[in-house]
């Protein structure tokens, strides 16, 4: 049921989600109500999701909390409002522990809308060119909420933050979510002192309310960080500590996540040559970006009596650094000419003139132009005169993808209504493992695993396996579900992961979630080509009752993607 | 003579320029010493110049004052250090007039390096696609100096600037240069209160020293504004007043200069549809940009014994908003792959982590790759994950051009040394009216007026002129040099400008500077196609002694430019 709340002068649509989804049963998240429409991007667990793009667009400026994208590295910790504390120490004169009640009573409260964007928004487009090490976000990895909390600056002032020259140069922040990365660590990161203290312009918030309601577990209950204009990955959820330091944060996730490396650097080189530690590749500010929400993917328009009138194209745009989106343009001729769209900025800019939220654009295109075009694309500009590149530059994390968003315009050979002219629109991708999109390699009709990655799955059975293939029934596989005896199925083959449980970068827990089951979707949504190759040494046979000659060829793309034929910008 | 000064910890090369250039004789600037190497971009007057690109590169991080680009809208006013005052009023509690002595004694002084860039840097590339309303900057419309002065914030605090809610929202600033624009006005503009007061991050300076020496007349003596990260056009020279206001500045140049309009908007539509007054098209922050300085234009490399070894490519890069340039890449294959360059940032970032200066990049390319490539191009990235577009989007002022900088690599059919292999490099353009550059339309051998614009000069003689062409000798033309009797020559034709003197947007003074002379170069460097068409109604004949059949065809491009064939991004 949808109702509206008025928060800080903004109308916030509220869509209830009271039930625990059946996909969350048997996972550590079996206590968290979630909206069933959310598209799951990493199988069942951990929970990473985005809403369907049309649903995101439908709600406009403020996104209902239950439909807001979620990025969880592990299970949300169960925290208690009354006992939760934030420990603040390091280069401060008065280290303290603050309860939620302290935060609510000791500091001025502020309420403001901020658009959060995952740095991986639109990553699936890059993954279709070449699978990187991140899962496949569509174009709905963002949302806008009205946040209520206190200023980080006020809290740091209260603790007597030391001066820059005394060594108070970075503000490290960590959450309560214990994760396997780096041999075990909390999810943490740091921002510079300047950003933390610059409330005049940037207003970093320690927030406990989203759209007028206390945070949900997925969004950091009871308290999280919100940094206007930054990528979501810096906004620590389930905040438990703040440490002021001379050096930037030293934890695993601060270095091994949220970086854009040059196009030639793949996962192996990144580690071997220590690219994760090179300071120039960290990402903080969002870059200029936009997408088309109308026409939607697979939308069909049928013209019955000539091409009279116009179609209203719509979409969103945003940028970072508080820069306003000043221009959005559509091209129907591959970028030779650009039409200026009408912009709508529902946000009231801050006194410092900053814009921290997305905006919306519209353009009425004559139907005749749609009929005469094979593709439409959008690009936005901001006050810094930055615009989106025509094509993306691939990077191993697939982050900050902001090339022009291109929607193909197909004519249907058989119109929906006889005598009419039907056009159908195709977005570049659909989120996660959903099929569809012109960048996705076309499969043969018979075997269409939506999960198939763009690049050829290196299929290297061991010599032994090849010589004498063993076959197992699904029932047999289903018996091996313990940490010391753990099998699973991937793309029709059976794997024994028992000896790998403790080495798995994602932890044994996440393998156990699929123990005894078909893990193809879970695996593909999270893993790189390298991981797929690694997997082969744990293959113990195939699923079946002894048939010979199952060919994996059917799983491979029937042809190179059109995108690859066109030649992407990335290496 | 070159010497070095150490200012604020930075080594500043000083190149003396003590003489008044003979081109400045008979102009209002006949008292200002200028370096003879500077390339004049607008004929003799007003003085607008950039250094030769190799000379700019040679001096590295800090640019000698005498070789720094200059953008003057009119003659520099003659101001006196001892009597000069800055009047500060508007939404302040204590309006004051401050002398230079007041500034030097009442406020804390700061010294810091800032790169200044004209918003028109690299405009000639856009003009080669279609002549806009600005003159042709090459890629040397920028320079870096160490500036000394006081913070604008401190001065405004001293005057008791009112609060934002009391109406102190904009800071208007004007210079002493009276100009003809808008029916007569001082050159002025405004910045937001936030930028003016944000000394922690942006540090707007009222500066009286450049590289440790008092300002020269061309750079704003005795005092000017320096706004780190902004386009040069907002940095008022010869500062005479500061007014704090509720609305942004209302003067002619604030609205009719330093704007980037969408590609479909030409000079006529801009005025007719009031595009100059639409707030979204103002420009302030610099955008990400880079250029190649080595290889230089026309540089030749000759390989004598195979293609052993590497060539060191070099150039500069900068961005706006304090964003550091984090990556510079070269492509030798039209953007399919990109090589990472080595970066050198001589600047010490501010405590807030801001970078206000250019940086330098290098890449050692194997000679064999040069031999196998037809073009090299460079692009830079900044911390905001902004990068340069592949092609520019034309705008009527040709500002903020930051597409990839492309240098063509030609093989010389006849090597410089017999038996060798000679490659010659060609930049896109050369500054001002200098010939050369692959974007410049090729002329026939006989008639190569360097001044010819890229687009066909509309040649519409009046019917009367066509019927009976009158001929005048140069001696005859030279007699008409007064305001009430003013002729000049343009492209071989004679014009009587007498009746137009008071209507000229640039003022009668600038026509008088070329009275009785050949004004072709002066005219072409400043005027749009529209102005050329307007000119025709003042044509009274041609230069010559009665020859018949002078053909203007020789003035037209022999062929479409390669760039046009390739299809630019702009409309």
Image (spheres, coloured by chain):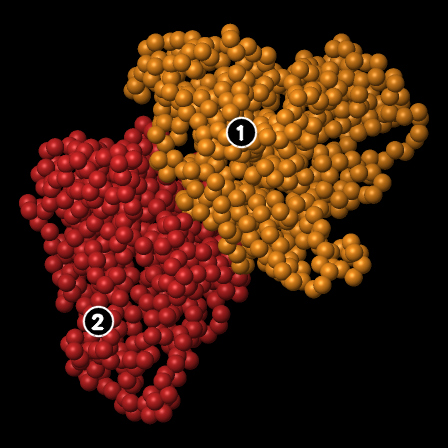
Chain colours: A red, B orange
Q: Position of residue A483 (x, y in %)?
A: 16, 75
Q: Residue furthest top?
A: B83
Within the image, what quadrant is residue B227 found in?
top left
**Residue at 47% over, 47% down:** B381
Indicate left or right for B460 with A519 as reference: right
- Res. B114 mark: none
Residue in the picture at 26% in, 66% down: A505
B129 to the left or right of A170: right
Q: Residue B5: which numbered mark, if any?
A: 1
Percent x, y of residue B501:
70, 14
Foreground: disc 1 or disc 2: 1
Q: From what the image shows, is residue A447 above or below residue B31?
A: below
Do the residues bearing badges 1 and 2 touch, measured as CB atoms within 8 Å? no
Inspect this view and state whether residue B211 appears.
Answer: yes
Observer-nearest of A70 and B449: B449
Local secondary structure at mark 1: strand
How many marks on residues? 2
**Mark 1 crowdedness (10 Å alpha carbons): few <14, some 14-19, many ≥20:** some
Name the side, left or right, on which A104 lies relative to A570. Answer: left
Residue behind mark 2 = A502
Tag 2 subunit: A
Q: Is residue B533 above or below residue A38?
A: above
| Position of A229 relative to B25 (above/below) | below
Which picture quadrant has residue B464? Answer: top right
Give x and y (percent) for residue A313.
42, 46
Which x, y percent locates residue B536?
76, 25
A225 or B21: nearer the viewer: B21
Chain ID of residue with mark 1: B
Residue at screen point 43% across, 42% down: B324
Left or right of A143 in this view: B333: right
Query: Camera-side residue: B472 or B3?
Result: B3
């Amino acid at each position: 049921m949808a109702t509206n709340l008025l928060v800080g002068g903004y109308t916030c649509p509220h869509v209830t989600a009271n039930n625990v989804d059946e996909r969350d049963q048997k996972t550590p998240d079996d206590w968290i109500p979630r909206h069933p429409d959310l598209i799951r991007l990493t199988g069942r667990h951990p929970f990473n999701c985005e809403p369907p793009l049309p649903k995101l667009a439908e709600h406009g400026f403020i996104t209902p909390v239950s439909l807001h994208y979620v990025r969880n590295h592990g299970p949300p910790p169960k925290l208690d409002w009354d006992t939760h504390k934030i420990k603040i120490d390091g280069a401060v004169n008065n280290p303290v522990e603050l309860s939620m009640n302290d935060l609510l009573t000791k500091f001025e409260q502020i309420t403001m809308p901020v658009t959060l964007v995952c740095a991986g928004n639109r990553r699936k487009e890059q993954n279709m060119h070449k699978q990187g090490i991140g899962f496949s976000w569509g174009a709905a990895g963002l949302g806008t909420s009205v946040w209520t909390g206190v200023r980080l600056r006020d809290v740091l002032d209260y603790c007597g933050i030391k001066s820059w020259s005394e060594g108070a140069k970075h503000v490290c922040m960590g959450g309560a979510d214990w994760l396997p990365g780096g041999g075990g660590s909390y999810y943490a990161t740091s921002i510079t002192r300047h950003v933390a203290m610059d409330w005049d312009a940037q207003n970093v918030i320690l927030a406990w309310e989203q759209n007028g309601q206390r945070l949900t577990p997925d969004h950091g209950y009871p308290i999280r960080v919100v940094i206007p204009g930054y990528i979501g990955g810096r906004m620590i959820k389930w905040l438990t500590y703040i440490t002021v330091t001379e050096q930037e944060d030293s934890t695993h996730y601060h270095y091994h996540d949220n970086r854009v490396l040059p196009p030639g650097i793949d996962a192996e080189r990144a580690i071997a040559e220590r690219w994760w530690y090179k300071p120039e590749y960290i990402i903080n500010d969002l870059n200029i970006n936009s997408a088309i929400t109308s026409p939607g993917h697979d939308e069909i328009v049928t013209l019955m009596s000539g091409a009279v009138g116009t179609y209203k194209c719509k979409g969103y745009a945003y940028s970072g650094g508080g820069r306003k989106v000043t221009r959005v343009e559509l091209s129907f001729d591959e970028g030779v000419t650009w039409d200026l769209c009408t912009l709508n900025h529902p946000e009231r800019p801050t006194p410092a003139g900053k814009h921290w939220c997305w905006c919306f654009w519209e353009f009425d295109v004559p139907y005749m132009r749609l009929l005469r075009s094979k593709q439409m694309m959008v690009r936005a500009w901001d006050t810094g005169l930055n615009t989106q590149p025509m094509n993306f530059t691939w990077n191993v994390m697939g982050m900050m993808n902001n090339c022009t968003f291109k929607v193909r315009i197909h004519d249907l050979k058989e119109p929906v209504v006889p005598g009419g002219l039907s056009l159908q629109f195709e977005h570049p991708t659909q989120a996660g493992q959903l099929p569809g999109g012109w960048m996705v390699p076309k499969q043969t009709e018979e075997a269409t695993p939506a999960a198939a990655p763009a690049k050829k799955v290196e299929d290297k059975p061991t010599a032994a396996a090849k010589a004498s293939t063993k076959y197992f029934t699904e029932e047999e596989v289903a018996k091996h579900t313990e940490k010391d005896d753990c099998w699973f199925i991937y793309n029709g083959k059976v794997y024994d992961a028992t000896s790998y449980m403790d080495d798995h970068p994602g932890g044994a827990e996440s393998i156990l979630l699929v123990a005894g089951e078909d893990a193809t979707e879970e695996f593909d949504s999270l893993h790189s080509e390298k991981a797929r190759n690694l997997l082969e040494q744990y293959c113990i046979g195939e699923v079946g009752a002894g048939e010979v000659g199952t060919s994996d060829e059917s799983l491979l793309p029937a042809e190179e993607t059109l995108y690859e034929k066109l030649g992407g910008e990335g290496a």
